[in-house]
Amino acid sequence: MEFTIARGEVYLRISAILILVLAACLIAFDTQTKVIVFTIEKKATYKDVNALKILVYITSVAAGYNMLQLCKHSAWAYSGSKFERSYISMAWISLLLDQMAVYITFASNSAALEASVLAITGSQTFEWIKLCNRFTRFCSQIGGAMFCGYVASFIMALISTISAYRVFRMYSPKLYTVSE
Amino acid sequence: MEFTIARGEVYLRISAILILVLAACLIAFDTQTKVIVFTIEKKATYKDVNALKILVYITSVAAGYNMLQLCKHSAWAYSGSKFERSYISMAWISLLLDQMAVYITFASNSAALEASVLAITGSQTFEWIKLCNRFTRFCSQIGGAMFCGYVASFIMALISTISAYRVFRMYSPKLYTVSE
């Protein structure tokens, strides 16, 4: 049981890293150039929207954080859990960091989604023009990145549930641990 | 100790409700009319921005949810905790709902913040005009609402910590309960 959960966490973290990196790449390498009038060209990149810039940073940092957790995980697996005291504080810190990672990824994704929705619909009252009918491919790629971001948030939420389980288990070994 | 935490939760929930209602009212009753050219007037309301509309709904629902929790809380306080089994499942459900409430409030706030930032800065590349130099009072009121929203999210995060403590305590009474 314990082994299964540990392995499950590793798989979840690896998939979270892959999806986060995919999302960051999808946004960062997304450019489209359109001719507006005669020779005047317009290039759309993720740098035009602050929310996307922030999202690239945050997904990268989240991927890096999960990578570090993976390293810590394998380090613990080899050393064995001899240091019971520091193991408990480690589990708490992991839980808090995991929670923070989920919140921040989820929120920045939602902020970027709002910007994307504005780009699709425009705003008549505000005289903001629609952009996605001009930069269609750019927008659909961003849409894919958004989707990846939400999937990654969901996976990270699952991981933080496992972290919570780790903390729980330490305070009540009888209820949660099944013999190996 | 137990009594203090219960009272703390009640105070936190009441303040969360008040702040959420304040945020919803700040957004919903925020209008500003500006004369653009001669007799052509423009009125800015929260209905012009989808993110603000959604935020009004979500803050209202979150306030209502906290109100229900408060009712449940006082109902339990009077009935006493005789039904140990259903109390445990109640605590789990509370924890999950509290977590969901925090996530959703936080994310919708971030989405509305992104829309507001776009309204303040505009976007040169996208030819989106700045709006807050025209509708200054409208924008600052929305800013106040955003701030309230984040404060409420923070308070709700604290509440969900208390919910987590409740769940914890049930599985390990020795570590967490101090005699009354």
Image (spheres, coloured by chain):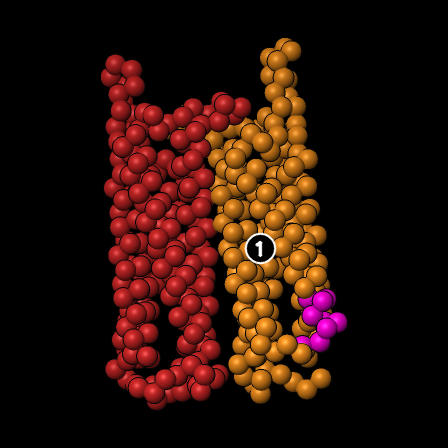
Chain colours: A orange, B red
Q: Residue B63, position in %: x, y?
A: 32, 58
Q: Nearer the viewer, residue B74 or B147?
A: B147
Q: Residue at x 30, y 19 (%)?
A: B36
Q: Amino acid at mark 1?
A: Ser
Q: Residue at x 45, y 77 (%)?
A: B167
Chain for numbered disc 1: A
Q: Is residue A79 magenta?
A: yes
On-image quarter of the C terminus of chain A? bottom right
Q: Residue B53, position in %: x, y?
A: 37, 44
Secondary structure found at label 1: helix
Q: Residue B4, position in %: x, y?
A: 29, 75
In the rendered image of this protein, does residue B25 appear above or below residue A123? below
Q: Residue A173, position in %: x, y?
A: 58, 84
Q: Nearer the viewer, residue A150 or B169?
A: B169
In the rendered image of this protein, does residue B70 appear above or below residue B134? below
Instruction: Tell me the crowding category of disc 1: few under 14, some 14 to 19, or many 20 or more residues within 10 angstroms, Cα based.
Output: many
Tell whether B121 sits left or right of B34. Answer: right
Mark 1 = which residue?
Answer: A153
Q: Is residue A19 visible?
A: yes
Q: Quadrant of residue B161?
A: bottom left
In the rendered image of this protein, does residue A160 appear above or below residue B124? below
Number of numbered discs: 1
Q: Which residues are magenta?
A: A73-81
Q: Residue at x 32, y 49 (%)?
A: B148
Q: Residue at x 55, y 65 (%)?
A: A93
In the rendered image of this protein, does residue A118 appear above or below residue B69? above
Q: Is residue B167 magenta?
A: no
On-image quarter of the N terminus of chain A? bottom right
**Most frequent secondary structure within the magenta stretch:** helix
Spot the residue most to the top.
Answer: A38
